[in-house]
Amino acid sequence: MKGIVVAGVASGVGKTTAAVGIMAALARRGLRVQPFKVGPDYIDPTYHRAACGVPSRNLDSWMLPHRHLLELFARSVRGCDVAVVEGVMGLFDGSSPDSDEGSTAEVAKLLGLPVLLVADARKVARSIAATVLGFRSFDPQVKVAGVLLNGIASPRHLDYCRRPIEQAVGLPVVGYLPRRDDLQLPERHLGLVPEVEGPVAAEFFDRLAAQVEETVDLDLLLRLAEAPDPPAVDPVLFPPEPQPRRAVVAVARDRAFSFYYQDALDLLSAWGAEVVPVSPLEDASLPDGCGALYLGGGFPELYARELSENTPFLQSVREAALRGLPIYAECGGLMFLGRELVDAQGHAYAMAGLLPLRTSMEGARLQLGYRRVRALADGPVLAEGEEARGHEFHYSRLEMLEEAPAAYEVLDQPGRLEGFRVGSVWASYIHLHFGHSPGMARRMVAIASSRARGR
């Protein structure tokens, strides 16, 4: 097969721009490109999908057991011409300072894929070769196959960077991206703006692909992308045989709610769910026959007024909760289910009111990191006592208005209880990947099916 990992020497070196440009340029050649993102990121994959026309998949070697990661990768690359994997942070940055656990390097080794190293050349010349040499020699098991330079100012600048890399390090410089403000992706407080919000016109991807075609040797890149076929593993996440449709799972998907792992949605479908998108911004009610509601993360704080004004949908969710409909929410979904959401300007808006809490963007600080959790009761995706790995990434702060039972014990933060369980509602700031355990998606579908049958 052909596959390449696009990794950076650090965050902010243009890794996403380079990866999206390569994906778009290869897709314009008529190749079937399967995009991936290392780590728990929800936003970069929206750009991958826009560039390639197919969903991007997350490969997180901390949240996912390695066997499960290999199963998901092998399933996704069937029938594709080339896999392009965008890394996370720097090549060797992961969950620990003592190992490559959770890093781009670990994923590259697991998959046996070569690495294209993206280096920022905006404030450097010959010294960049020393950086590249360090990355090449730091872990001999990681195959750094080539270099892409970002921020090149002129042909002379390119020569001062390229020659020492190729002569002293022995790696080919596959190409470069010049200093161009019109190739910058839009950002805000949690990183890039999700492409689903529509801030990036189609012409941006055309412009970026044209730049890559002009200054990156795609033929050389494809030669470097030769890789072994994915390791054979017996499937454990997906059912051995197709399952009949037995439940409707409504999934909140619009500009306010877009943080989902594609493989998690695929697992729900594989185990018998009809996954029906619903918009808390625009729809008046949950879909007919709904057996469960999944409210993922996103940016509800940016659409708080519109969400608050859609009173028919809010009432539909309240009535569903009173009937005992299983509702599972993560991060932005938790904010939506509270009584009130205060935006960054201090304006307060009424939400669904199913949880006794208020969330606010005022005075908020970033909370992020991997989390191990244990369920404190039976819920929509975990039974009592079951453990899972997830990720926390939010700016909002939470104020409890009344006591409510917690959903999880956070195992790597002793003494911390997290999330809420009120009636049939289960909500937490922590995002889980259903690929962590074979039973998570299956459990949600089974509960939704039982609910739909009135049990």
Image (spheres, rainbow, N blue to C red):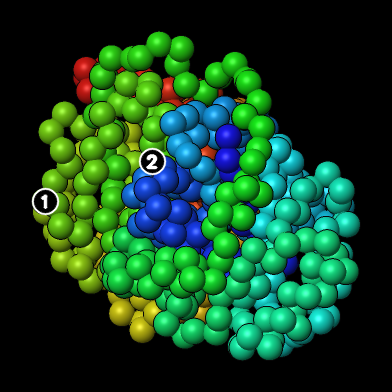
Quadrant in which residue 267 is drawn: top left
Q: Nearer the viewer, residue 359 or 41?
A: 41
How far apart marks 1 and 2 lie (CA) works out to 19 Å
**Residue at 67% of width from left, 42% of height from top?**
113
Q: Residues within 10 Å of mark 1 (few under 14, many from 20)?
A: some
One can see residue 303 in this view: yes
Indicate the amino acid at tag 1.
Ala
Q: Is residue 371 above or below residue 195?
A: above
Q: In the drawing, does residue 287 fall left or right of residue 255?
A: left
Residue 284 numbered tag:
1
Quarter the N terminus occupies? top right
Q: Secondary structure at mark 2?
A: strand
Indicate the amino acid at tag 2.
Tyr
x then y, percent, for residue 169: 85, 65
Q: Nearer the viewer, residue 303 or 5?
A: 5
x then y, percent, for residue 24: 42, 58
x then y, percent, for residue 300: 34, 64
Question: Which residue bears the numbered disc 2?
Answer: 328
* Lower sequence index among marks 1 and 2: 1
Q: Nearer the viewer, residue 41 or 385?
A: 41
Q: Residues within 10 Å of mark 2 (few under 14, many from 20)?
A: many
Residue 275 numbered tag:
none
Quarter the C terminus occupies? top left
**Residue at 37% of width from left, 23% of height from top?**
270
Q: Is residue 306 above or below residue 388?
A: below
